[in-house]
Amino acid sequence: MLWRRRLQPIAQPLFRLYARTTRGMTLGVRGAVLNEAGEVLLVEHTYVHGWHLPGGGVEMGETAAEAMARELVEEAGVRVTAPPKLVAVHANRGRFRGDHVLLYRIEAWEPCPASSRGEIHQIGWFRPHALPEDTTGPTRRRVAEVFGSDS
């Protein structure tokens, strides 16, 4: 087991408590990056189980589209070459009443070196109807939104 995943059950609730007491609202982004073969990019983090769409939090002074572009470079070595398409806005009430996540579809991109070190365990390209077994439920639902209900 990766050491960060062992700390996650302790660190994540502490971070969420901090976020709830210091912020009225948090905003995150997730991106469905598509390749020419029609596959979607997923990442596996070093600190949490399962496969996820790449993404993260929007920082102060940053637009959501800028955050999406930054997170893709950091996590997956993907540089957006055209504006991402907003697919959906979700309220993440189960985690924090003030948390919202924007889902983007990214079709225009080019590879680049990933700038984050130690956050991502591995990345992979998968057919939307053949995601890895340990893909998270929310990720499966977001992929279905992007590709339609038959994915």
Image (cartoon, rainbow, N blue to C red):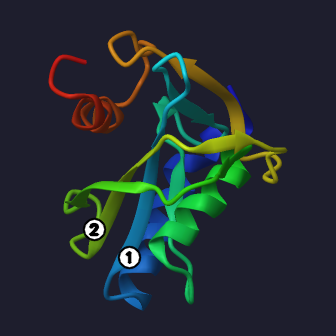
133 relative to 1 in the view: left or right: left
Q: Is residue 141 left or right of residue 71?
A: left
Q: Is residue 24 above or below residue 117?
A: below
Q: Which of 68 and 108 lies nearest the eye of the viewer? A: 108
Query: Residue furthest toward the left?
Result: 149
Image spot of residue 13 (x, y percent): 44, 62
Residue 121 left/right relative to 23: right
Give how far across and how far down residue 56 sits, in percent.
Answer: 52, 59
Element at badge 1? Answer: strand
Where is residue 21, by image quadrant? bottom left
Q: Which mark's residue is nearer the viewer, 1 or 2?
A: 1
Q: Residue at x 43, y 14 (%)?
A: 127
67 is higher (above) or lower (below) than 24: above
How dense is the environment of label 1, judged by Cα within 10 Å: few (below 14), some, or many (20 and up)? some
Labels 1 and 2 touching (C-beta < 8 A): yes
Q: Quadrant of the C terminus?
A: top left
Q: Could you say which is closer to the camera, residue 125 or residue 1?
A: 125
Residue displayed at 80% across by 44% down: 112
**Residue situated in front as seen by the camera: 133 or 34:** 34
Could you say which quadrant of the image residue 86 lies in? bottom left
Which amino acid does the dot numbered 2 rest on?
Phe
Residue 44 bears which disc, if any?
A: none
The amino acid on which the numbered mark 1 sits, given as a three-letter code, is: Thr
Residue placed under numbered mark 1 in the picture: 26
Q: Identify the disc placed on residue 96.
A: 2
